[in-house]
Amino acid sequence: MKCPQCGFVSFNGLAQCKKCGVPFKEPAATAFNEREAPKQSQEEYSADPAATLPPHWSETIQSIKKELEEIEGAPVDKQSHMMNGYSEEPQKCHTPPAPSETHTPASAPLFERNIVLTPKGGFLLRLLAYLIDTIVLMIIILLLIVSAMMALKRGTVMWHQADIIEIMSVYMPAFMIAALLIEIFYFTYCHGVTGQTVGKWVCGLRVVNKNAEPLGLGRAFVRWLGYWVSSLFFGLGFMWIIFSKQKQGWHDKIAGSYVIRV
């Protein structure tokens, strides 16, 4: 460095001339570098704090940041923010568009909207339909028993009362099993295929699912099994029809069925 006053040449970076004592003006570039160097190193340290950590710690932190970003939907720090290409400008809050008519309940399929609003069969009307079905089943089972006894009587001139009692005691288990199978077939087929038994047809009722369609054989069989559940606790499951808003007994809830008026 050369002194502008006396021309003495000395080392760079001196505050004043060693010969005449004239103070030197600090070069702008040198002053800038000296002021910015600590600041730059501090920014580099703060920008990448994970650089000073062991490698496995750094990977763990980056993994946690990634999971937090997936949860929050935005970078969790400035470094991730810049790496993902986000600008530092505050994000504008966009008002979500008003729902279109296609998403309103009124535009839903007809059966989804109307199954809740469709008039349902009440307890007394359904009880009447069940009594009619019971009479129909008794007639069918009685005809079956008479036909079986006539077949057993073939070739016999006369039956005594003791013979009838003996035959009934021997074949009663078979008759009971046959009656149970007839009942299962009657309710499963009618509710699963058409949605109406004879009693429900007379009373203007139909058993449907939430889509206002017949239950199908599988679900109809589940509904019949639900009769046994509804009969527990002195028939509380059947009485539940009175208190249910959709007039559903326990067997209806088990099968996901509704008894509507037609």
Image (spheres, rainbow, N blue to C red):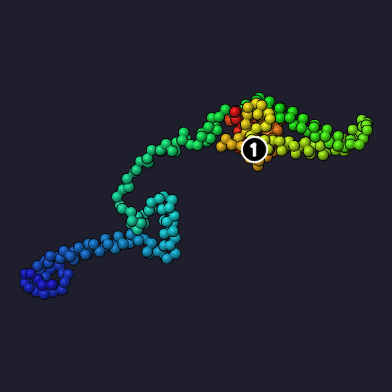
Residue type, numbered disc 1 = Val
Give the quarter of the image for residue 256: top right
Residue at numbered disc 1: 193
- On-image quarter of the N terminus: bottom left
Residue 239 visible in image: no
Relative to 58, 111 lies left or right: right
- For the point 86% across and 37% down, the residue is 151
Give the quarter of the image for residue 116: top right
- For the point 53% across and 35% down, the residue is 111
Q: Position of residue 261 (x, y in %)?
A: 60, 28
- For the point 71% across and 36% down, the residue is 186
Instruction: Identify which residue, 73 or 220, lies in the foreground.
Output: 220
Q: Position of residue 167 (x, y in %)?
A: 88, 36
Mark 1: give few (<14), some (14-19) or many (20+) Cα within 10 Å. Answer: some
Q: Residue furthest bottom?
A: 9
Relative to 242, 67 lies left or right: left
- For the point 11% across and 75% down, the residue is 9
Give the quarter of the image for residue 141: top right
Image height of 60 relative to 198, above or below: below
Instruction: Identify which residue, 42 or 16, lies in the foreground.
Output: 42
Residue 125 visible in image: yes
Image height of 66 relative to 112, above or below: below
Element at label 1: helix
Q: Position of residue 125 (x, y in %)?
A: 65, 25
Relative to 68, 120 lies left or right: right
Relative to 105, 18 lies left or right: left
- On-image quarter of the C terminus: top right
For the image shown, how many numbered marks are present on the structure?
A: 1
Instruction: Identify which residue, 150 or 60, lies in the foreground.
Output: 150
Q: Position of residue 201 (x, y in %)?
A: 65, 29
